[in-house]
Image: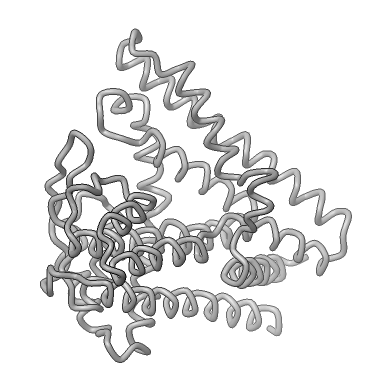
């Protein structure tokens, strides 16, 4: 197979995986029986954390342990995914191989679950049940939910939707295009490690430093690309502004404490005429972050619904670009 043929094959695999996951998500019955690849990776991280991140060790040693552990967290799943991909391609014909690999790859996207989680927050606010909305938003953000009023809950849901669009939808596609199934698995391993140990508190400041920095690096291309998908989505949504999305990214994205999260957050804030971000309260910690956008602070359930409309269109923009690119390369 030529390089162009392999790239077209990989893009077709990604397109099929995205479509399958958007429609079906990750089946609950399958999760109850075998869990999820991220859960498997998480179990490995938990065990390494328990064994190697001992409070009795000096910080330099804990930092070294964290780096070595991160290498194992990435290399082992990538090696297994490589073996699976090579075996599937060797045993099955190209279409059957693409179908099976697409099914496996679909588990590494989060379009469906992210949409459902954010929609549930909107439903809680629409019923006037702030306690329920706080409980539901706590499933997708790490901040203290009891510190949030209705507008705070709505902003938190929209911020999570924007950031996780980049991390959970665009980034796996980017690394899948670059490295097939092993590329996607490697990305998910790094991203899971960052979410579990890449914190700035006393326990993880040294041990999780490598995971946090590597996650910043691998998310850099996706965070910028996500802006393009959001701008294209805003062009097709009458209640959104693509120009405001672009200008807000230009003005505010680099002011975010994260080198990546500010890009999709600023794009969504500008597109919807909102102001999101700002100071955030976590258990035992207040993070004074910059505001993204110059619009309304008093976000509502209706704004969450508009953000979901924008999100669906942004997912569609990515899917169509992948599908058209795969067809053009294949036909060419």
Structure colour scheme: one colour
Closest to the observer, 210 or 120: 120
Residue 227 % position (x, y): 34, 71
Quadrant the N terminus occupies: bottom right
Closest to the observer, 35 or 248: 35
Residue 267 visible from this viewpoint? yes
Residue 187 % position (x, y): 51, 48
Residue 219 % position (x, y): 40, 53
In the drawing, does residue 226 fall left or right of residue 172? left
Quadrant the C terminus occupies: bottom right
Residue 180 visible from this viewpoint? no
Closest to the observer, 174 or 192: 192
What residue is at 40 percent from the left and 41 percent from the top?
195
What residue is at 66 percent from the left and 65 percent from the top?
10
In the drawing, does residue 20 fall left or right of residue 111? right
In the drawing, does residue 168 fall left or right of residue 272? right
Please tell me whether residue 64 is drawn above or below residue 275 in the rendered image: above
Please tell me whether residue 137 is drawn above or below residue 266 in the rendered image: above
Residue 209 % position (x, y): 34, 32
Q: Quadrant of residue 283?
A: top left
Number of numbered labels in the structure image? 0
What residue is at 49 percent from the left and 79 percent from the top?
316
What residue is at 80 percent from the left and 62 percent from the top?
97
């Amino acid at each position: 197979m030529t390089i162009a043929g392999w790239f077209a094959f990989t893009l077709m695999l990604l397109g099929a995986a995205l479509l399958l996951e958007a429609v079906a998500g990750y089946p609950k019955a399958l999760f109850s029986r075998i869990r999820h690849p991220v859960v498997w990776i998480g179990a490995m991280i938990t065990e390494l954390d328990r064994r190697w991140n001992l409070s009795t060790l000096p910080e330099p040693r804990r930092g070294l342990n964290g780096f070595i552990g991160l290498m194992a967290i990435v290399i082992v799943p990538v090696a297994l995914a490589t073996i699976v991909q090579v075996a599937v391609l060797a045993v099955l014909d190209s279409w059957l191989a693409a179908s099976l690999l697409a099914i496996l790859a679909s588990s590494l996207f989060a379009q469906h679950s992210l949409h459902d989680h954010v929609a549930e927050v909107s439903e809680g606010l629409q019923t006037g049940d702030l306690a329920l909305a706080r409980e539901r938003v706590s499933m997708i953000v790490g901040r203290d939910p009891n510190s949030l009023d209705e507008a705070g809950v709505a902003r938190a849901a929209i911020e999570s939707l924007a950031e996780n669009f980049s991390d959970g939808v665009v980034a796996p596609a980017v690394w899948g295009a670059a490295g097939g199934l092993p590329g996607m698995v490697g990305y998910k391993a790094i991203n899971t490690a960052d979410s579990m140990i890449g914190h700035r508190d006393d326990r993880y400041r040294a041990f999780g430093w490598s995971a946090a920095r590597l996650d910043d690096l691998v998310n850099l291309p996706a965070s910028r690309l996500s802006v393009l998908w959001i701008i294209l989505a805003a062009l097709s949504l009458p209640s959104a502004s693509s120009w405001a999305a672009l200008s807000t990214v230009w003005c505010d994205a680099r002011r975010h404490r994260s080198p990546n999260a500010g890009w999709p957050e600023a794009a969504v804030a500008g597109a919807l005429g909102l102001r999101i971000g700002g100071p955030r309260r976590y258990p035992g910690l207040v993070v004074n972050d910059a505001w993204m956008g110059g619009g309304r602070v008093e976000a509502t359930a209706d704004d969450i619904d508009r953000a979901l409309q924008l999100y669906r269109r942004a997912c569609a923009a990515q899917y169509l670009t992948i599908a058209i690119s795969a067809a053009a390369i294949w036909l060419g």
